[in-house]
Image (cartoon, rainbow, N blue to C red):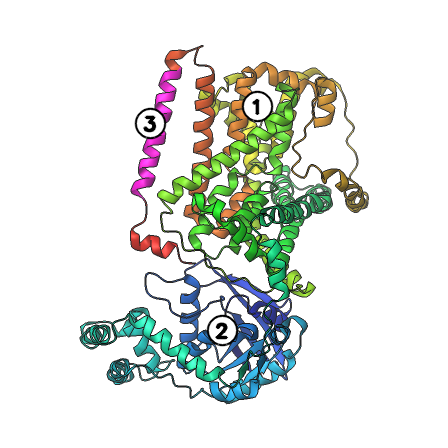
Amino acid sequence: MTQKTIALVGNPNCGKTTLFNAFTGTNQRTGNWPGVTVDRKEGEYQHNGLKITIVDLPGVYALDAEDGDAGLDEQIARDYLMSEQADLTVNIVDASNLERNLYLTTQILEMRLPMLVALNMIDIAKERGVSIDPVELSKRLGCPVIPLVASRGEGVTTLGDAIERGLQDLAVPPTYVAYPAVVEDAIGELVPFIEERRPNAPVDPRWTALKLLEYEDSVAPDLQGRELDLIVVPHRRKIRQVLGEDLDLIVADSRYGFIHQVTEGTLDRTREVSTTLSDRIDRIVLNRWLGIPVFLLVMYLMFLFSINISSAFIDFFDILAGTIFVDGLANLMESFNAPNWSIALLADGAGGGIQTVATFIPVIGFMFLFLAFLEDSGYMARAAFVMDRFMRFVGLPGKSFVPMLVGFGCNVPAIMAARTLENRRDRLMTIMMNPFMSCGARLPVYALFAAAFFPIGGQNLVFGLYLLGIVAAILTGLILKNTLLKGESSPFVMELPPYHLPTAKGILLRTWDRLKAFIAKAGKVIILMVMVLGLLNSIGTDGSIGNQDSQNSILSATSQAITPIFSPMGLRQENWPATVGIFTGVFAKEAMVGSLDAIYGQIASEEAVTTEEVEEEAFDFWGNIGEAFASIPANLAEIPGALLDPFGLNVGEVQDTETAAEEQEVALGTFGQMVQRFDGKVGAFAYLLFVLLYFPCVSATAAVYRETNWRWTLFAALWTTGLAYWVATMFYQVATFSRHPGSSTGWIVAMLAVMGATLGVLWNLRPTRRKAQQLSGT
C-alpha cells in the first residue's frame, strides 16, 4: 500500500482540527515538535487503497516568523512546509472570513508547493449572506478549491477524492505576486545566487529571496555569510530609501492587492447581513455590566460540571483500580507465595500509582470535556476578553483566569488547561501560579484542623486560607513578571469566532486526545514517585515490610530525624507525625489526613491497637467491582447538595469532639494528640499555611513537567516549598514574639534576608530583551 503525507495548515478557528478529526477519528497520535513542547498531532486514514498520514500544523495567520521575534507556531508551520516532509499541503480557509484567510494562502502559493484549498464553513458564509464562486476562485488561485462544511461532514468525501488526485498530480500552482520594481530588482539578483547554491531547494527561490530581504535568515542558514550580505544589505537599504517604509509593510500591501484581484468577481457581499446571531449574543455576553456575571455563571457551571459531577465517578475509578491493581494483584501474588518486598513494590507501589492516576481520570476528563465545549462553541475567546483587564494586573491575559478557577477544584487539570493559552510566557506564569490555588484535596486537611483547633467558625478559617492562596499566586505572578518571565505584555488582539454548536465527535476526540496525553506522560511520573514514597512508607528500619503509616517505617524515621528543620514554624520534636503528614502530602494532599490519623491514633491508643483484634475482611474481587459500580448512583444522589456549595467551604461548627471525629472519619484520640503536640492555634495555623503553599502533589508536579520541562518543574517545587516555609516561619515567629523576642528577631531578620537574596537572584536571572521577546512568542 502506497504511503503519502499531507499537511493541514490554516488560521486559528478555521475548522482545521474538526477536519483532522473527520479524517482520522481515534487513529491519532500526539508528540512534540523537535526541540519544543508544542504538541504535534498526526493521524492516518485510508482512501481508495492509499494510506495517508495527516500532520495537523499549528493554527497560524501567516508565515512571517521573523528571527528572534517569532511566534513558535509560525516557525513550526513554516519550517515543516519547507522540509519536504509533506507530499501535499491542504490549506483550510474560513469562507466567512475569506480575505483574511487568503493571506496565508498567498504565502503558501508563493512557496510553490503542491497544494489545494479546503473552503470550510460555507454554511456560515451563506447565513451571513456571503456568496463565493469556488470554481472561479480555483482558477484565480491556480489550485483546486473544495467547498465543505467539516462540522457536518459535508464535502469531506469530495475533499478526500481531491487529495487523492493532488497526491497523484503534485501540480505546483503557477501563482505570481507582483511587488514594486525596487523589490523585484532585489529578488531578481538574489534568485540566481540561491539557485546556484541550492539547486534542489524544496521551495521556490523567489520566496526564499523575499524572506532573506525580510531579515528571516533562518530560512536559508546554509547561505549565510559575507557573500550573501554583499547582495542583501545594499538592497535592503535601497528599498528603504526608495519606498520610505519597512519591507514587511510593502510585502503585506502587495499580497492584499493580489487577494483583492482574486476575490473581485468571486466574492459577493452585496447581500451580507449587518447583524448576525453571534453579534446579538455578544451584546449580552460582552456587555459592560452583564459580561462578568455571565462569565461567572459559566465558570460556576464549569466548576460544578468538572469537579462536583466528576467527583461522583472518582470512587468508581478508585475502587476499581484498587481492586484490580492493588488488592487483586497483592492477593494473586500472595497465592503464589511471592516475597513481601515484591508485593510492596508491585502492588502497593506500582499498583498504588496506577490507582492514583485513575482517580484523576474523571476530574481531568470532565474538565477537558467542558473546556473543549467552550473552545468549539466560541465562548472561550469571549471569556478571555471579559477578564482581560483584571488579569493584566499580574501580566496575564484574561484567558488565564479559567485555569486559575479550575485550580480550586484540582491543580492537575488546571495546569493542563493552561495549554489553551497561545503565549508561552503566559502559559508558564499561569502554571507557576496555579499550585497556590487551594485545591479540593487540601480541604480535608483544613477540616481536620478546623475541627481540632477552631471548632467555632471553621468555615472562616477555610475561606481565609483560600484567600491567602490567591494572594500568594498574585505575588508570585508579580515577581515572575519582573524577573524570570519579564517581557512586554502583548496587546490584546483576539479573533471572536462565530458561535456554533460543537459536534459530539469533535469535543470527545479533543478530550480523549488531551486525557491520553496526561495518562501517557504525567501518569508515568506519578507511578514512579508513588512507588518510591510507598516503599519508604512500607519498609521498616529493621528491613521488614508492611509498616505503612506506623512509627517503624523508614519514612517515619526520616521524619523524626528532620523534624527540627521545621521547628522555626512551630513543630516540636515530639510532633514528628506532622512531618510524616508533610511527606505523604507530597504523594497526595488528601493522604495527609489518613497518615496523621493513623500515627496519632496509634500513639493515643497503643494498648487498644495491640489488644483489640481486628478481623481482616477476605478479599472479594467481584464484590469490590460491584461496590465500584454501586458508588456511581450513590455519589450522583449527593450532587444536589453541592449546588449551593461547589467549593465545599462549609465545614460546619462542631464543638463536640466525638461528633467531629466521626464526621472527619478519624480516631477520637487523634484530636487529643494533635492538641497536645501542636503549639496551640498558632502552631496549627502555621502548619496549615505550610500545607497551603508547599510542594504540589506528585500528580500536579507531573502535570507541570508534562507542560513545561524539568527546570520549571524544579523551580515550581523549590519556590512553593520555600515560600511555604518562609510564610509559616514568619507567621509563627511574629505570633510568638513575646515568648522569645531574641530568637524570634533572629529568625525574622534571617527570613527577610533570605527573601531579599532570593529576589536578587531572580532579578539577576531575568532574561535579556531579546530572550524576553522570544519568551513572549507562542
To which residue does mark 1 refer? Answer: 577
Q: Which mark is residue 101?
A: 2
- Residue 427 horizontal/vertical position (percent): 47, 51
Q: Residue furthest top?
A: 739
- Image vertical order of residue 496 relative to residue 664, above or below: below
Q: Which quarter shows the C terminus?
A: bottom left
Q: Residue at x 47, y 85 (%)?
A: 141
- The residue under label 3 is 753
Quadrant in which the N terminus is drawn: bottom right
User: Residue 709: x percent and y percent?
Assistant: 44, 50
Q: Within 10 angstroms of label 2, few (less than 14), some, or many (20 or more) residues? A: many
Q: In what element is the residue under mark 3? A: helix
Q: Position of residue 162 (x, y in %)?
A: 58, 85
Q: Identify which residue is drawn at 32% across, 32% down.
A: 757
Q: Quadrant of residue 112?
A: bottom left
Describe the element under mark 1 as helix, strand or loop.
helix
Residues in magenta?
A: 744-765
